[in-house]
Image (spheres, rainbow, N blue to C red):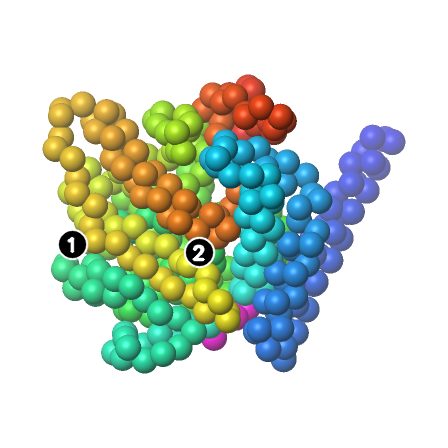
Amino acid sequence: MALSWRLRLKLLAGRWLAAAGGALVAAFFLAARAVPYSWMAGAGGWIARTLGPRLRPSRIARANLALAFPEKSAAEREAILRGAWDNLGRTAVEYPYLGRLWDYDPGQPARPGRIEVAGHEHFMALRDDGRPGIVFAAHLANWELLAVAAARHGLDIAVLYREPNNPAIARIIRRIRGQTMGRLIPTDLRGGLALVGVLKGGGHVGMLVDQHFSRGPLGTFFGHPVRTAPAAAKFARAFECPLHGARVMRLPGGRFRVEVTPPLPLPPATGDAAADEAVLTQAITDVIEGWVRERPQDWLWMHRRWRAERPAAPAGVPSAIPSAVDKPGAGR
């Protein structure tokens, strides 16, 4: 009986905490209607870059930075880490402003504004070519703006997304995303089937492919082994459709640059589907590595990207990367 009461109290406490978290997020979204974007973004960036480097995820970030940039000094890597936290803080508070941030008009691409787009013609080609298409992206700057960009260009695109664990917060985020983005597909067991249906119908899908996936093919990222989700490569091969990369860059003054690449060339098929998918997945990863090298402060360094094997950290840098591979729940 005592155990039963403990479980009930635990469940009740969990519900209260979830409700409280949802109420705080709802209050923040309401406040955002009155507070100017520049104030809110500045506050979010300052809080994150001040507190973030002291938090546990920064151990992972520092180990990742040491692996990726052994040639940089500790001070240079710390500057990147602070920039990454600043970006994350700004991204977190930008949710209620997503619709208002977008001021780029495809009909007047030269008009100055908060948003600029490079590769506008690739959005239009995807929209008008009558074929299925795939857009891959990474957690760079405010990556949520990519789905907004597609929607504002009239491109019907289905986007994979992961819901927050808190149901109340998930409902709020889903409503914001639904107002500014295209079709949203949860990253559950049905997500893959839904994407296949979209592509079979001649639609387009967007996916983030810069994180660890325990069942992905082995490749390299910054010269170290990684495993990456092969879905983008698998679908591009299966449907023989255009495969584009897209990224967001955070610019000074609260501005953003969205960039869409030309379609990646698909290497000739060898008859070995798994090997072909691994080659194309590596090509995608190479594009993302180039983006991160160019603007490392825009990337999400707090994620345990290198888990395929345990790479040796440079001398004097304690590794925060676990030695065990593919532990239950250790990656997707």
* 120 over 133 or under it: above or below: below
Secondary structure predominantly adopted by residues drawn in magenta:
helix
Q: Residue 191, how many percent across, how many down? A: 38, 43
* 257 over 190 or under it: above or below: below
Does residue 61 show up? no
Residue depicted at 42% across the width and 38% down the height: 189
| Residue 99 is a magenta residue | yes
Give the residue type that dot 1 points to.
Arg
- Viewer-proximal residue, 92 or 78? 78
Question: Helix or strand or loop: what does disc 2 sit on?
Answer: loop
In screen coordinates, is 248 left or right of 49? left
Magenta segment range? 96-100
Question: Helix or strand or loop: what does disc 1 sit on?
Answer: loop
Q: Residue 270, how many percent across, how many down? A: 13, 25
Residue 147, quarter of the rendered image: bottom left
Residue depicted at 38% across the width and 64% down the height: 257
Q: Residue 137, how many percent across, how many down? A: 36, 49
Does residue 136 show up? yes
Residue depicted at 18% across the width and 23% down the height: 272
The residue where tag 2 is placed is 143
* Number of numbered callouts drawn: 2
The residue where tag 1 is placed is 131
